[in-house]
Amino acid sequence: MTGGITRWWRSAGAFAGAVAVAMGAVAAHLPDDRFGLPEGRRILQSAVQMQMWHALALLALGLGLSRPSRLAALAGCGFIAGILLFCGALYITAFLGHHLGSVAPTGGSILIASWCLLGFSFLCHE
């Protein structure tokens, strides 16, 4: 499991980075009236920033850990889930103007927990 998971992290990080760059271009060039809310551009920019940081984290995990511990594996998988939930919910809100209830806060909580798991993994394993 652990050897293949780092490849998945690298791939997920690369694709998440590509989507973040594309969405950043949309945020920069899309006319204001195409957003679902007056603050849609700001929401989109927040999602892009969060996605890019976590894309880089996935790349670092995939490149830096040849044999991740269980905690690190959970953290990496949590980054993927958190990106999908948090950023996905913000993209939908920005474009459609629909808030998806607790999806974004849940995704954000997963991202926070994943960072904590990663920190604990570094404390517990060499």
Image (cartoon, rainbow, N blue to C red):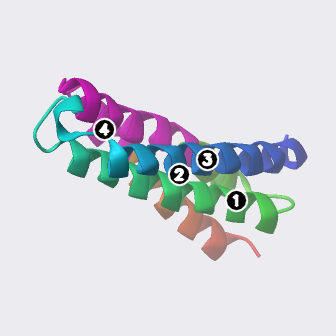
Residue 53, can we see it?
A: yes
Secondary structure, mark 4, is helix
Q: Residue at x 45, y 44 (%)?
A: 23
Q: Nearer the viewer, mark 3 or mark 4?
A: 3
What is the x, y in percent for residue 77? 62, 43
- Above or below: residue 32 compared with residue 92: below
Q: Report the disc number at residue 59.
A: 1
Task: Say whether disc 1 or disc 3 marks the residue closer to the N-terminus.
Answer: 3
Nearer the observer, 55 or 120:
55
The residue tagged 2 is: 21
Q: Residue at x 72, y 71 (%)?
A: 125
Compute the Cα span from label 2 to label 3: 5 Å
Task: Say whether disc 2 or disc 4 marks the residue closer to the N-terminus.
Answer: 2
Residue 74, can we see it?
A: no
95 lies left or right of 26: left
Compute the Cα span from label 1 to label 3: 12 Å
Nearer the observer, 68 or 95:
95
Compute the Cα span from label 3 to label 4: 17 Å
Q: Residues within 10 Å of mark 1 (few under 14, many from 20)?
A: many
Q: Nearer the viewer, mark 2 or mark 4?
A: 2
- What residue type is disc 4 on? Leu
The residue tagged 4 is: 90
Secondary structure, mark 1, is helix
What is the x, y in percent for residue 118? 58, 63
